Image (cartoon, coloured by chain):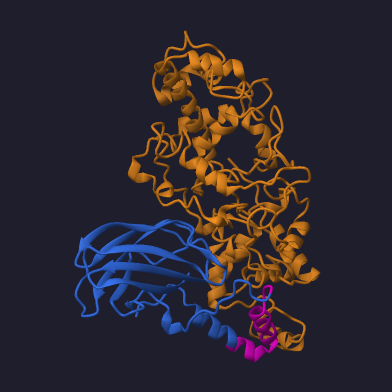
Amino acid sequence: MNAPPSNPNRFRRRYAMAATVLGAVAFFAAAAAHAGPAGRHRAEPPARSEFGLGPRVSAAGHYTATLQPAASLRQRELQSVRVRIADAEGHAVDGATIEVDGGMPQHGHGLPTRPRVTKSFGEGLYEIEGVRFNMGGWWVFSLAITGSAGTDKVTFNIQL
Amino acid sequence: MTTKRILAALAALCVASVSAAPGGGDRWTAEQIEVIGSLSLAALGAPPADPTNRVADDAEAAALGRRFFFDARLSSNGLVACATCHEPALGFQDGKPLAKGVGETRRRAMPIAGMAHSPFLFWDGRKDSQWAQALGPLESAVEHGGNRAQYAHVVADHYAAEYERVFGALPDLSRVPREAGSVENANAREAWARLDETQRDAVTGVFVNIGKAIAAYERTIELQRSRFDEYADALRATGRAPSNVLSSEEVAGLRLFVGEANCTRCHNGPLLTNNDFHNTGVPARAGSQPDVGRLAGAADVLRDEFNCRSRWSDAGAAQCAELEFLVADAESLAGAFKAPSLRNVAARAPYMHAGQIATLGDVLDHYNRAPAAQVGQSELEPLGLSAAQLHQIEAFLRALGGEPVE
């Protein structure tokens, strides 16, 4: 499993345990859950198992994508991420068009840059350049893939 | 230590109903220690290379740039230098709501230390290198007020030998008038239009090199460690909070800073900024036009005469990734301004892009209330923190002091 570099859920779980012991945190957690004006931008992060760099199956099941950053994903720096794409039978998908999108569902904003695929290496491997995460937290990183099996979207949940 | 921890736990239990600080006191989880460590100056490292400026790390260029920085001959009235608004004694800023050169600007002077780490400069990020940034005020009608031919002559008259050691031979300026440039001043503009392209390029080349020397100097202006850094480094090294480095109020403020108050959304990393642009709903100064900030700045940097892709840049096109992947058309850019570094922030009142907010306490009150934006949409949500909690954050911010040094 490609665990995110710093796992939020482990963080939350330990946090919650500490809270139970000390009591004080129950108050804090409740306050945090209700922070913000009626949750203008609030969206709940998915289960821990939904986080990571893949392999992730696209919404309609046409593709599987795996993110392969050169180093672990980090905040602030402009970075490149390779992605390997296969079809439902596990065959490499070459010649696909890939559109990159994403953002932070809890904050209602998109990616701070406009990353795009700049190279393809064959065997289903592509390079996405211009990726930046400007804050910690839950990010969504999605790839709209148009290839031999049609257009389908893979969505990654990443914790920075 | 164990006894202390037990006591701390007991104390936390006792105040459970009123405390909003999980773990309380000086106890941190491994993940919190990681976050706090990531804010330490020790995590900063050297500035990234600046491929747009071939003399960025040249000591002789920096020495020359330092002289330019303090030279008021580089202005229309002989009274304004870079150091006028970026006073070393004030942490390379001026303490004024709006910067004042030969006239008054519409924004607050920004500090310089650590800016070599920032991909975009100015509150709206309309420049993408320190040298391109330095050239802006020189030709602004309200800052230095002069023009590039004037500045090229200053270099030829007063700095010829030093300049030539760094940049090679000066061009022949004997037929270039002393006032010429594409600036607001009509005489200088007309004179500029009369020059042929070779003359204009010769003048601009010297002008650009003034900027590159100043940038080389500015890269050497470093931040000093603060009490917070001492705390963070000891915490990271031992897993335990050091005693007598931060007060309990400052520690409580740090806990809010990395937690409930959401400060590290934007003020993250060792400079306590993500160097990005955010709409925080800060109202315009009374009587001022609303400012669209990054929305204009993003468009400006793409067409800037001196950007990374320009012929004045020493970078190859492939080295201009910041421009290549820039978002220039998102709604979120309207009313967004650069998140400034919080290092030394207590010594830098008044605050925000036009000095609209007088004190740190008022800044925190703004974030706590999160008013709607006049331009675009604020990213903030009300925090619902108590006055005591805001004081704790303020106390923590005051522990981020450390005067920049050359």
Q: Position of residue B148 (x, y in %)?
A: 53, 22
User: Which span is picked out in magenta?
Assistant: A17-37
Relative to A159, does residue B102 appear above or below in the rendering? above
Residue B229 location, quadrant: bottom right
Q: Residue at x 54, y 37 (%)?
A: B133
Task: Count numbered badges in the picture.
Answer: 0
In this structure image, what is the colour of chain B? orange
Q: Is residue B128 visible?
A: no
**Which chain is the one coloured blue?**
A
Q: Is residue B374 visible?
A: yes
- The N terminus of chain B: image quadrant: bottom right
Q: Residue furthest front?
A: A150
Q: Residue at x 42, y 42 (%)?
A: B50
Residue B320 location, quadrant: top left
Q: Residue B171 in magenta? A: no
Relative to B103, does residue A49 appear above or below in the rendering? below
